[in-house]
Image (spheres, helix red, strand yellow):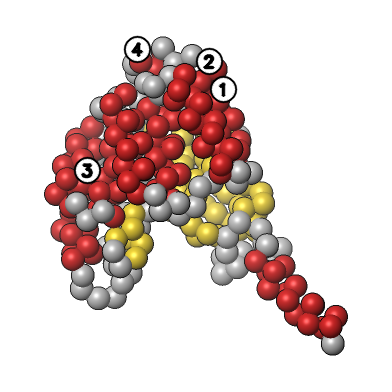
Amino acid sequence: MKWLAAAMLAVPLMAAERVYEIRGQLVPESAASISLHGATTPFHATTLAGPSGRFTFKKIQPGAYTLIVFLPGRGETRKTIDIGPSVADKRGRVELAVRLDESKMTPDRTRVISMRELSIPKQARDAYENASRKLERRDIDAAIAELKRAVEMAPQFAAAWNHLGTIAYQTQRYAEAEGHFRKALEADANTYEPLVNLGGVLVTLERYEEAYNYNLHARSISGGARTPRPPIRWTTSCGTIPIGRRRRRCGRRCRSCAAVRRRRGLF
């Protein structure tokens, strides 16, 4: 009986530890840089797709993710995906096709480099890359330490501040996230991701008019196109609302969801 009880306890534990493999295909075939970001928990991984457009991510825990496909000289596209048993085969493999529509891509602005970015020392960039590797192993505390080291060496490092803000948001430290995103904007006021991420934090904090202004600015610097989804999901007082989706998840009328719906044309 003792063995049976232990076995019964082990079954849900084993199920909870199951991981998945993402097998992706870009359509049409194209070489690209691919990154995978946790949408609700801190995680980051990168890989490359060759000329065939195929890519793979292994040992991925179940959950919601944002897949970002970057094509140098062309732009980037994003796709929100949910990984779990409902979309995987018996071997835990998730087959994913990502269609590339250049008319909907965010333009590639990587060739425009600010003087502040050029001034970021190599040690700070190395710390930023180390943080990404720590997040791939889900070592959140170590990733935060590396990012803090990066911004101590280079306070103008907007991407590192934004990364700190994303982690703080996903761990429900909203006031801290707001501060980090504002630091990113102090470093570069026209950086898209901290603009739209700060808007998301302000929606969560129910400061809707302020959020509106930041997302309006984000849309303006994206060339007027519909603003793509950032790598985090926003949380209102009644639950999580993925950016860009028209249906609210709470199933009832509430002030925070109504505010998101009024502004949804910008998100």
Disc 3 marks which amino acid? Answer: Asn
Pointers 2 and 3 in contact (CB under 8 A)? no
For the residues marked 3 and 4, what is the alpha-carbon distance in whole angstroms? 25 Å
Sequence-earlier tag: 2 or 4: 4
For the residues marked 2 and 4, what is the alpha-carbon distance in whole angstroms? 15 Å
Asked if residue 232 lies left or right of residue 199, the reply is right
Residue picked out by circle 3: 215
Horizontal and vertical percent position of residue 214:
21, 40
Sequence-earlier tag: 4 or 1: 4
Asked if residue 118 lies left or right of residue 191, the reply is right
Pointers 1 and 3 in contact (CB under 8 A)? no
Crowd around label 1: few <14 · some 14–19 · many ≥20 (10 Å): some
Which dot marks residue 115?
Answer: 4
Which dot marks residue 93?
Answer: none
Disc 2 marks which amino acid? Answer: Lys
Which dot marks residue 126?
Answer: 1
Q: Could you say whether the residue bearing mark 1 is in a helix, strand or loop?
A: helix
Disc 1 marks which amino acid? Answer: Asp
Q: Could you say whether the residue bearing mark 2 is in a helix, strand or loop?
A: helix
